[in-house]
Image (spheres, helix red, strand yellow):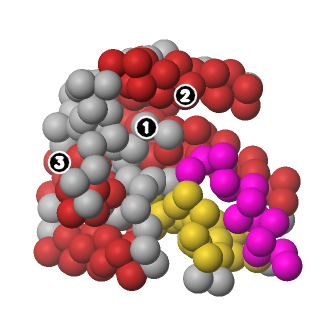
Amino acid sequence: MSSIDFYFSIGSTYTYLSVTRILDVEQKHGVKFNWKPFSVRAIMKEMNNIPFPKDKKNKVEYMWRDIERRAEGYGFFAKTPVPYPLTQFDLANKLAILGLKEGWGIDYVQATYKRWFQENKEPATEPNISEICSELKLDKDKIISKANSGEIEKEFLANTDSARKNKIFGSPSFIVNNEIFWGDDRMEDAINWSKK
């Protein structure tokens, strides 16, 4: 079975499309995605890259509408604009790292994105985080405390450093044999490359 590294940040808008469909794609194509939450925010700051610039209204409106259209094309939906940028970006992603270690990470990421893009509820803030913890039967205070631990912070920084070394500049990104495929619309290209 082909293995593909899936670098993503909760906080990236187009990543909604990937996390919502990735398990179906994985099953359909017989591949395995290795989920790697990282700080795209840190990397974009280093590049002085602003994804939704306030002075480019037409581009911003296009990007929100594009996400809605693409979601509809995949058979689900998005209601944009959504709260952006995230106020709890680091916590949202550190919770994903903790969850992936403990077995609830994918459910958490998908539920977080669903509430963000379908109900306008910002990740890692109320009421989103309490609702997700209730749904996944998690102790909210306990997982937030663990997510803020030095161990999880270290892994978050390591994933971000790994993204830098792989020359990743955006989320979602897929790495196959040192080749980078950036963007939700490149997921299938990454799969095809993995089967060469």
- Seen from the viewer's position, the closer of residues 187 and 63 is 63
Look at label 2 and name its amino acid.
Ile
The residues bearing labels 3 and 1 have C-alpha atoms spaced at a distance of 27 Å
Q: Residue tagged by mark 2?
A: 67
Q: Are marks 1 and 2 in contact (CB under 8 Å)?
A: yes
Mark 2 packing: few (<14 Cα in 10 Å), some, or many (20+)? many
Look at label 1 and name its amino acid.
Thr
The residues bearing labels 3 and 2 have C-alpha atoms spaced at a distance of 33 Å
Q: Nearer the viewer, mark 3 or mark 1?
A: 1
Q: Is residue 143 left or right of residue 19?
A: left
Mark 3 packing: few (<14 Cα in 10 Å), some, or many (20+)? few
Q: Magenta stretch?
A: 183-196
Residue 78 visible in this rendered orientation of the protein? no
Position of the N terminus by quadrant: bottom right
**Mark found first going from the N terminus, 3 or 1:** 1
Classify residue 97 by image quadrant. bottom left
